[in-house]
Image (cartoon, rainbow, N blue to C red):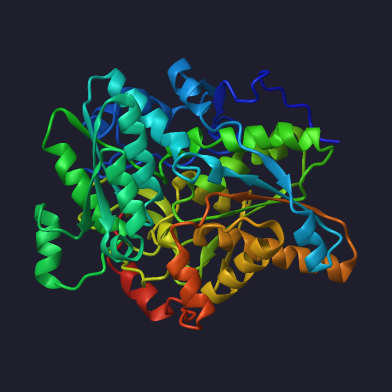
Amino acid sequence: MATKFLLPEDGIPTSWYNVAADLPTPPPPPLHPGTLQPAGPDDLAPLFPMGLIMQEMSTEPTIEIPDEVREIYRLWRPTPLLRARRWEKALGTPAKIFYKYEGISPAGSHKPNTAVAQAWYNKEEGVTKLTTETGAGQWGSALALACQLMGMECLVYMVKVSYYQKPYRRSMIRVWGGEVIPSPSDTTECGRAILAKDPDSPGSLGIAISEAVEVAVKRDDTHYSLGSVLNHVTLHQTVIGQEALAQMEMADAYPDFVVGCVGGGSNFAGIAFPFVGENLKKGKKTRCIGVEPAACPSMTKGLYAFDYGDTAKFTPLLKMDTLGHDFVPPGIHAGGLRYHGMAPMVSHLHQLGLVEARSVMQTEVFDAGISFSRSEGIVPAPESNHAIAVVRQLAEDCRQSGEAKTILFNLSGHGHFDMAAYDNYLDGKLEDYAYPEEKIKEAMKNLPKV
C-alpha cells in the first residue's frame, strides 16, 4: 500500500518539494566564472529574479506555490495517471505499467510547470521581457505561453537543427507572441563568432544559452529563463511526482521503478525527486532511472566536474555530469536531450547512488515508442520514448523472471510536432549513433580548472 500523501481537493499540490532538504550531503554550490568562488545571490541577479535565486539556494523542505501560478496550473493540472494495460498485454509481461501523462498541457509537455512559475517571479520584480534557448521547441513554446499569460515579451533562441526539423513548434512560439531566432545567429556577438568559425554550425543548447544570456545581461528590463538544469527548475517540476504519489495510492499501487528521460534533467527530477524523498524519509526502495541518448551520454559517459552551462562561458560553473561545454551533439531527433550537462541536483543524486542512469540508441527509442503508441494510442515525443525504451526493457525482465513489478514512467510530452522523425524511422532513414569516446576525451580537456 502506498504511503499516504495528501493533496487538496482539486488534486494540485500547494507547494513544491525540495529534495535538498532530505539529502545526506548537500550538492556543491555554483561558482562565479571569474573568481571561481561560490556564487552569491548578487552574482546571479543580472540573470534571475531574487525569488528564484532564493529557491536555487534553498534547503527548506517545501516552498509554497503562489496562488496565481496555481490558478494557471488549473488549465491542465492535475495531469492523469494511466495504466498501460493494453501495452502490458502486448508485451506479455506480468509487470504493472503506469504513466503520468504531461502531454495534456497547452504546450504539450511538462515544461509549463516551471515556465509559468518563472514568468510570475520575474513579473513580480518588474521584469518585462524574458530570453531563453530551446532545443526541440517544447521549452520555448512553454515560456512563450507563460509570458503571454503574464503580459510579458519573450525572445527564444532555437537550436538551428531543431528550428528546421520542428517548424510547428516555432509556429507555436509565434502564436503565443514570442519571437524565435535560429541559433547560432548574427544577432549576438557570440553567435557571430561561432558562425565565423563554422558557418554551417547546427547549433547546440550551449550556444543558444550563450546568445540568450548575452541579450539578457545587456538590458535592465530583461532576464534570462532556463527550462531545465537549475535547482529552481527541478523544484517546480515536482508537482508531477507529488501528484503521482497520491494517484498511485488511489490505484492501490506503489512503484518498484520510476523512469524518465534525461537531457537537462527536469522531467525526470519532477517525477523522481518526490519518490527519492520517500526512499530517504520512509525507507522505500523505489529505483529511479534516468534515460539518455547514447549520442549525448552525460550521465553514463561524462565526467562529474565543474563546467560552464553554456559555450561562451557566461554562466556560473556548475558541478554536474558533463560532456564539456564545447560539446556539439549530432542532430538526433530527440532535440530536447542534446544538452552537454546534467542538472547539478540530478548529478549529485547520481553520485550518491540515489538515482541510476542508462543510455539507449535512437532506433530502439522509436521502436519502443511505436510499440507503446500502437497499444495505448498516444504518440509520445521522441524524448519520452527514451523512458519508454527502458520501461520495455524492465517489462521484458519481468516477463522472463515472472515477477510482477510495478513500473511508473513520465510520458513528458506528445509527439504531434515530431512526425517527420517518426517518418524517418519508419522509412529506415534513422541511424544509431554512439558519441565516440575520443570526442568525449577531447571535450574534457577544456573543462575549467577548479
Which of these two is toward me, 309 or 293? 293
Q: Position of residue 203 (x, y in %)?
A: 26, 64
Which of these two is toward me, 371 or 431? 371
Which of these two is toward me, 199 or 87? 87
Residue at point 46%, 39% (across, down)? 106
Q: Is residue 247 left or right of residue 165?
A: right
The correct choice, above or below, for 114 with respect to 420 in the image is: above
Is there any visible trace of residue 184 in the rendered image? Answer: yes
Q: Residue furthest right?
A: 402
The correct choice, above or below, for 70 with respect to 307 in the image is: above
| Number of numbered discs overlaid on the protein picture | 0
Q: Which residue lies furthest to the top in this view?
A: 67
Residue at point 45%, 48% (across, down)? 343
Q: Is residue 229 left or right of residue 287?
A: left
Q: Is residue 159 left or right of residue 304?
A: left
Q: Is residue 74 left or right of residue 219?
A: right
The correct choice, above or below, for 366 with respect to 117 in the image is: below
Position of the N terminus, as image quadrant, is top right
Q: Position of residue 369 (x, y in %)?
A: 61, 65
Is there any visible trace of residue 316 in the rendered image? Answer: no
Residue at point 51%, 29% (across, down)? 75
Q: Position of residue 199 (x, y in %)?
A: 14, 72
Q: Position of residue 391 (x, y in %)?
A: 69, 61
Q: In which quarter of the image is residue 215?
A: top left
